[in-house]
Image (cartoon, rainbow, N blue to C red):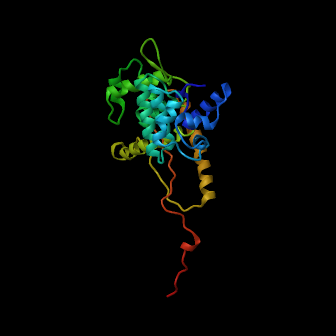
Amino acid sequence: MKPITEYNDYRIYMRDFYEERKRTSYFTWREFASLAGFVSPTYLKLVCDGKTRLSKPGIEKVARAMGLEGFGYTYFGLLVKFGNAKSAEEKEEALRDLGREASVNKIRIIDADTFHYYETPTCPIVRELAPLMPKADPCEIAGKIREKTSALDVRDVLQFLVKTGLLVKNSNGSYEQTEKSVKGSKSAIPLAIRSMNKKMAALAERSIERDSVIERNFSGITMGIDEATYARIVDVINDCRKKIIDIARECRNINQVYRLNLQLFPLTDKINKRDCKKGVQP
């Protein structure tokens, strides 16, 4: 059975534990429930099937039944917190807690690393900026970032990027990007991107006041459309983004880091036919 840190769903971990015990001995859901101290013989199966959630009091019972102690016990509890969260904010908090626990115990958790990378703009900015400044120290790199950033934050980000393999530090002290991409689970990636989009949107707002119109390009369209038209526009935006990436890759004299936000969002609720009233003739 895989180490618990390789799991991002507590239900899958519980089911794998059950299947492992069942493979090596006579083990049933009834015995699993009894081992954890539950009266209902089917409760844990319902949890693993996603038909109910593991309760807070049940976390300790199940963790002990599976022999989890120390960090494993804490990690399982945070997995339950993440899996049972009803809002994106609660899930984000659980991922932050997982990241803190992993850091304290010197253990890598892919989802926690993913969320940390996208949680603030500093990580992707430094990943692009550091290779452009050979042998620069964190203070010098921080000085080039327009959003106020401390040298300590840059140092921590550099260490994180090297640890996760997103940057390589050469013997001469310079940094190089790797082809490695940021990976995570289907549940963590959308949360991470959501957090990043919020922070980048805030930076875009500040850019309006701070940066010259020569350095920035802001434009927008307010329009009425339907679902089919929306889908067509999204396809065009995706094609445009891919073309822009290709153009950026062709650049051989990089001297600045930019961010492009492509935003298409509703300004009103949908209007149904019953909302449209016939005009009244005077």
Counting labels gives: 0
| Residue 29 or residue 128, whichever sits in front | 29
| Residue 218 or residue 149, whichever sits in front | 149
Residue at 59% across, 50% down: 234
Residue at 59% across, 25% down: 2
On screen, 89 above or below 122? below
Which quadrant of the rendered structure holds the N terminus? top right
User: For residue 256, which quarter of the picture?
Assistant: top left
Q: Is residue 196 visible?
A: no
Q: Is residue 144 visible?
A: yes
Percent of width and height locating residue 32: 59, 35
Percent of width and height locating residue 241: 56, 41
Percent of width and height locating residue 207: 37, 44
On screen, 266 above or below 242? below
Percent of width and height locating residue 217: 44, 45
On screen, 32 above or below 1? below
User: For residue 125, which quarter of the picture?
Assistant: top left
**Residue extending furthest toward the top:** 171
| Residue 49 or residue 163, whichever sits in front | 49
